[in-house]
Amino acid sequence: MKKTASFILVLSLLLAFIIPAEGGLAAEGNLLFNPGFELGSTEGWYPYGECTIEAVGTEAHSGNYSVFVTDRTQDWNGVAQDMLDKLTVGMTYQVSAWVKVAGTGSHQVKISMKKVETGKEPVYDNIASITVEGSEWYRLSGPYSYTGTNVTNLELYIEGPQPGVSYYVDDVTVTEVGSAATWKEEANARIEQIRKRDAKIRIVDSNNKPVSGVSIDVRQVKHEFGFGSAITMNGIHDPRYTEFFKNNYEWAVFENEAKWYSNESSQGNVSYANADYLYNWCAENGIKVRGHCIFWEPEEWQPSWLKGLTGDALMKAIDARLESVVPHFRGKFLHWDVNNEMLHGDFFKSRLGESIWPYMFKRARELDPDAKLFVNDYNIITYVEGDAYIRQIEWLLQNGAEIDGIGVQGHFDEDVEPLVVKARLDNLATLGIPIWVTEYDSKTPDVNKRAENLENLYRIAFSHPAVEGIIMWGFWAGNHWRGQDAAIVDHDWTVNEAGKRYQALLKEWTTITSGTTDSTGAFDFRGFHGTYEITVSVPGKEPFVKTIELTKGNGTAVYTFTVDGTDAGNVLYGDLNQDGQVSSTDLVAMKRYLLKNFELSGVGLEAADLNSDGKVNSTDLVALKRFLLKEIDELPLKR
């Protein structure tokens, strides 16, 4: 019996670490003891202040138990765990919990950390805060950067509702985000992995024989990642403005020119003249454009004539706006911010009901099926409103809105803490929808600090796999919406330290290289995803230039050209069915080919020759298996 009891105790302790969080399993690396109360007790936890805590099996977010906090005499009373020996100074952590208030009404709930250093007053850090409705589970989360010396007390606790209000807590997690000392190194490692790919340029003669000694110059001319800025009519007529834009950005968004109040200052008098002018300039210069915005939810940003409309009249105005602006820019705007800042306004919702929000998305999709539809809001990476944003997006999706992208505004006043931003992006990325930083700036009179903030934001966002672009909200002090203290170019057109830092990052993340083909006619390079111009100089012949797209994918992207400049076919080794990726489908195809049940020819046959020995056999089959199992990193095999 003693052995059985010991086994059960050990098993229970193990289960405490592998059960809670969302869906049943604990977040990997959770530092808390008994984080989901699945021991059936509050072991590891204690009351924070005058209250009672009890593990209960009547309510649980996941698993079988949660903790019930009752008899609270102060709003800060709650459930706590000692973190002093669990956290490391210099590290940033992601903290989350699920909370359900007993009863009805709206309540504020918080995750907080109390820290005491020798000889100093206690510090109370608010990690996360959210307004909840009673009788429903809510998740709240946020980053915590642990700093200090001679810390003697460190307590994590969940607090918030008014005294006397009871609530449940479940699935609490604390996981590492990164170290202040090594974040940049770790970000660069992620960039190397997610933003680059191996490529091979092959030069052959008319008989498909390799040609060695050919000079190859590789120059990246466009990035797959979106680097852009807001653009405005206030600057477009200045050649210094347009020249800087062309040299530093590949995406644009109109600061005000596509907003409703700009397009229709009085009802029925619609003009897109300024927006069309900006778009035409962008199109002439190969700059992609995202649309901002069809609607803007806060009342203060509505056209003045719209504010007096209600009911059918307001609905007709909404339909007229949709049916005018979306078709007007169909095929031009690649993105649309459908209804800007829905977290911070309710002009349309309060008058027409919450169904108007998904309606806007559905109708925009019908009017332009190819445009990617975005939500867009602030306080997501700069403050603690990420959980409310996630909840809103989930509601929109559940009610039929198709959302292709999540826009997060990044208007920073204080320091840009890269690991805090990463934690907030990690949280948002759980939705599985691409993220764009749609409006970035940092306002500080210290231009060196402005430069540091810019690098922190850009490097951490560029290193995040869910982020697909960053748009500055202006660059020149002469027309920046936040003034010269947020600009990267001064009034006199001097590129300041922040601007130089931005240009240095662009240079760092742009691939330019050169060399000569080897005995197999190949020149290998590793480059950032994007568009390249490849200049091929064959001795005794005129150089020729080819344009290639280096896209995301497994294995080495192979581009083959003949000495006369023609395209001999691009080969992605292992991609037998030519669908642009290497997968188990290709493995099946190779097995069938070797069994003579499947035909391969042309590029598909070349893609199957994984050791480049001129034939496809069991050696290639083994290589493809090993690649899919990640036992080898690239194809074709080096000879």
Image (cartoon, grey):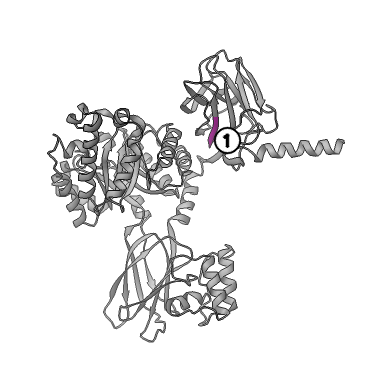
**Is residue 473 shown left or right of residue 210?**
left
For label 1, the SS is strand
Q: Residue furthest bottom?
A: 207
Quick check: is 630 in the magenta stretch? no
Q: Residue furthest top?
A: 73
Q: Residue furthest front?
A: 312
- Front residue of 247 and 4: 4
Q: Return the x and y of residue 201 as percentages of the image width and height.
A: 39, 72
Quick check: is 92 in the magenta stretch? yes
Relative to 528, say whether 497 is above or below.
Answer: above
Which quadrant of the view contains residue 47?
Answer: top right
Q: Return the x and y of residue 158 as percentages of the image width and height.
A: 55, 25
Crowd rating for badge 1 (residues with CA inside 10 Å; few <14, some 14–19, many 20+): many
Q: Quadrant of the N terminus?
A: top right
- Front residue of 33 and 70: 70
Q: Is residue 417 visible?
A: no
Identify the residue shown where x is 26% and y is 79%.
542
Q: What is the count of numbered marks?
A: 1
**Residue of label 1:** 174
- Front residue of 459 and 302: 302
Question: Which span of residues is magenta-colored?
Answer: 88-98
Which quadrant of the view contains residue 352?
Answer: top left
Identify the residue shown where x is 85% and y is 38%.
3
- Front residue of 75 and 481: 75
**Is residue 597 shown left or right of residue 444?**
right
Q: Is residue 606 visible?
A: yes
Relative to 485, say whether 405 is above or below.
Answer: below
Q: Return the x and y of residue 107 as percentages of the image width and height.
A: 47, 21
Q: Return the x and y of residue 624 as percentages of the image width and height.
A: 56, 70
Amino acid found under the numbered disc labelled 1: Val
**Is residue 143 shown left or right of residue 28?**
left
